[in-house]
Image: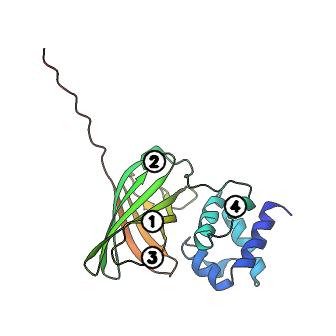
């Protein structure tokens, strides 16, 4: 059995049709109903092939890991599990400021994308107490798209509270973002495992200019 067949079998064993639709297809903007097949095994096979044909298997693995983190999905396709990100374009590197609303609560975020990792730090108030949560993110560029300038997916893989406040836990986030022509902003939607979506916007922050020291004789 090759790695793709193993992946199909493992997904079929750990997801029902409803979970596939809501936890994998919906955040990935895939129309589940349009996937060929009538039974679960056929749907899963078509889903895996959909990602493979677009060279986006890593995006599928990230989605599976986010939904079922106790399973070593990377081992099935012969890759080591890691928190480091796939190589991304240089224009993505740096700091991005983000904002969105969740049930009328305003949330602000700082996204830091480095060559080897990405961190998203989110601030929000719950019962008038500040909460700060930091997520480790996968960053995946999507070039096979009708969008002229491409898309970017940000996928939460782990989190920790910097300031826990009144929060008892946190649902990892998933962002599907469109790139503007100048590659200075990302707009799209944020999702979590509850199926809640929010419109979101990120803007690239300029790097601070280095000032030259003046020396006197």
Q: Which of the 4 image quarters holds residue 131?
A: bottom left
Badge 2: few (under 14), some or many (20 or more) residues near its Cα, within 10 Å? some
Q: Residue at x 64, y 82 (%)?
A: 33
Q: Which residue is mark 3?
A: 169
Q: Earlier in the sequence, mark 2 or mark 3?
A: 2
Name the spot of residue 167 as percent of width and height, x first.
38, 77
| Of labels 2 and 1, the one closer to you | 1
Q: Is residue 106 above or below residue 142?
A: below
Say if residue 21 shows up in the picture.
Answer: yes
In 3D space, how far apart are the residues under numbered discs 2 and 3 (Cα atoms)? Answer: 26 Å
In 3D space, how far apart are the residues under numbered discs 1 and 3 (Cα atoms)? Answer: 9 Å
Image quarter hosting the C terminus: top left
Of residues 62 and 55, the one nearer the viewer is: 62
| Of labels 2 and 3, the one closer to you | 3
Q: Which residue is mark 2?
A: 114
Label 4 SS: helix
Residue 160: mark: 1
Badge 1: few (under 14), some or many (20 or more) residues near its Cα, within 10 Å? some
Residue 52: mark: 4
Q: Name the residue at the top extreme.
A: 217
Label 2 SS: loop
Q: Earlier in the sequence, mark 1 or mark 4?
A: 4
Q: Earlier in the sequence, mark 1 or mark 3?
A: 1
């Amino acid at each position: 059995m090759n790695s793709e067949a193993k992946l199909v079998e493992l997904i079929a064993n750990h997801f029902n049709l409803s979970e596939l639709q809501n936890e994998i297809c919906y955040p990935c903007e895939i129309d589940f109903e349009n996937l060929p097949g009538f039974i679960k095994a056929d749907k899963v096979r078509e889903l895996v092939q959909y990602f493979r044909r677009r060279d986006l298997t890593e995006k599928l693995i990230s989605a599976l890991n986010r939904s079922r983190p106790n399973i070593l999905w990377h081992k099935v396709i012969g890759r080591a599990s890691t928190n480091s990100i796939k190589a991304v374009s240089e224009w993505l590197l740096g700091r991005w400021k983000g904002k969105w609303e969740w049930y009328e609560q305003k949330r602000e975020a700082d996204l830091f994308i480095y060559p080897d990792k990405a961190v998203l730090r989110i601030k929000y108030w719950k019962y008038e107490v500040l909460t700060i949560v930091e997520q480790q993110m996968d960053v995946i560029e999507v070039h096979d798209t009708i969008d002229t300038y491409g898309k970017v997916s940000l996928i939460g893989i782990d989190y920790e509270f910097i300031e826990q406040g009144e929060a008892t836990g946190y649902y990892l986030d998933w962002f599907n973002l469109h790139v503007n022509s100048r590659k200075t902003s990302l707009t799209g939607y944020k999702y979590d495992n509850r199926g809640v979506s929010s419109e979101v916007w990120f803007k690239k922050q300029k790097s601070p200019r280095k000032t030259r020291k003046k020396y006197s004789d």
